[in-house]
Amino acid sequence: MSKTVILIPSRLSATRLPGKPLLKINGLSIISNVFKKAKEADIGEVYVATEDKEIVDDVNLNGGKAILTSNKHKTGSDRIFECYEKLDLVDIDYIINLQGDEPNIEINDLKHLNKLIKLHKPEIGTLASEIDDQSNLNNENIVKVITDIKVDDKNFPIALDFKRKVNNINLNIYHHLGIYAYKPNILKKLVNFEQTNNEIKNKLEQLRAIDNKIKINVGLAKFCPIGVDTMEDYLALKKKLEYNS
């Protein structure tokens, strides 16, 4: 039976909103909210990978599991690979990299990704949602993925490129979600590649895979979670989630 592990990279030293993993929503930190959602998806074991003891303590206090990693990592993929190696897990088919700043991730979308990777066995799998506001095509804070064919509920097409701004609307363009499912050997290969100029210029680590001819398949997410990058994001999401609860 296929086995998947979910690893959640997190650190306190975010550029735009330092300390955000420990900001609270409904009395629970953002990182522990994400851990809770990942556990509820019932896909496999879940661990937080972090360079900060404060995050380890918070996750442990709230019933989760966390691994302390180096503070030298440049990307989340590098951090989760160290975590994966430290855990020394056996017979893992896929490692899901789940962002630690999206506490309203939809559990059914996580399950959908897991179903797709089991069926199609990609090198890397990810998710994207429909873009409902055309003005977002020029919003550099919203990452877009361009696929070879239209994405629907059942297929898993190949990503051709990832961009922050898109001018040609006659393409299959979607709002990319920062979640990845890697075969362990592909993640190892990826983190051992040098960062590419394309990746550094656009600040998109998935471009390292594209630039090195690693295929990324894209599944359709029904819901687009709100990432917390600024205090305004946090206050808006806190208001929404606490009101809905």
Image: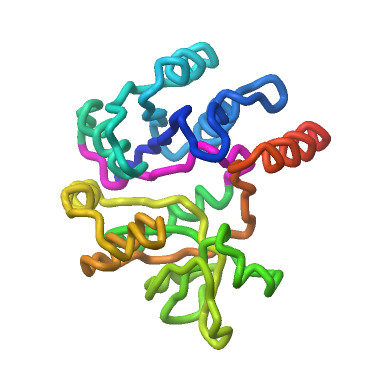
Q: Which of 212/242 is in front?
A: 212
* Residue 114: x %, y % from top left: 43, 51
196 vs 168, left or right, is left
- Indicate yes or no whether the magenta region holds residue 100: yes
* Residue 4: x %, y % from top left: 34, 42
At x 36%, y 25%, the residue is: 51
Q: Residue furthest right?
A: 243
- For the N terminus, which image quadrant? top left
Could you tell me how many numbered marks the image carries? 0
Q: Is residue 227 above or below residue 147?
A: above
At x 37%, y 73%, the residue is: 158
- For the C terminus, which image quadrant? top right
Magenta region, residue range: 91-107
Q: Is residue 130 above or below residue 51?
A: below
Q: Which of 54/102 is in front?
A: 54
Q: Which picture quadrant has residue 213? A: bottom left
* Residue 127: x %, y % from top left: 48, 59
At x 58%, y 49%, the residue is: 108
Q: Tell me, what colour scheme is on the image?
A: rainbow
217 vs 40, left or right, is left
Q: Magenta: predominant secondary structure element?
A: loop
Q: Is residue 118 visible?
A: no
Q: Is residue 172 above or below residue 142?
A: below
Q: Which of 245/192 is in front?
A: 192
Q: Is residue 124 visible?
A: yes
- Indicate yes or no whether the magenta region holds residue 26: no
At x 46%, y 16%, the residue is: 54
54 vs 233, left or right, is left
* Residue 41: x %, y % from top left: 52, 39
Q: Which of 94/54 is in front?
A: 54
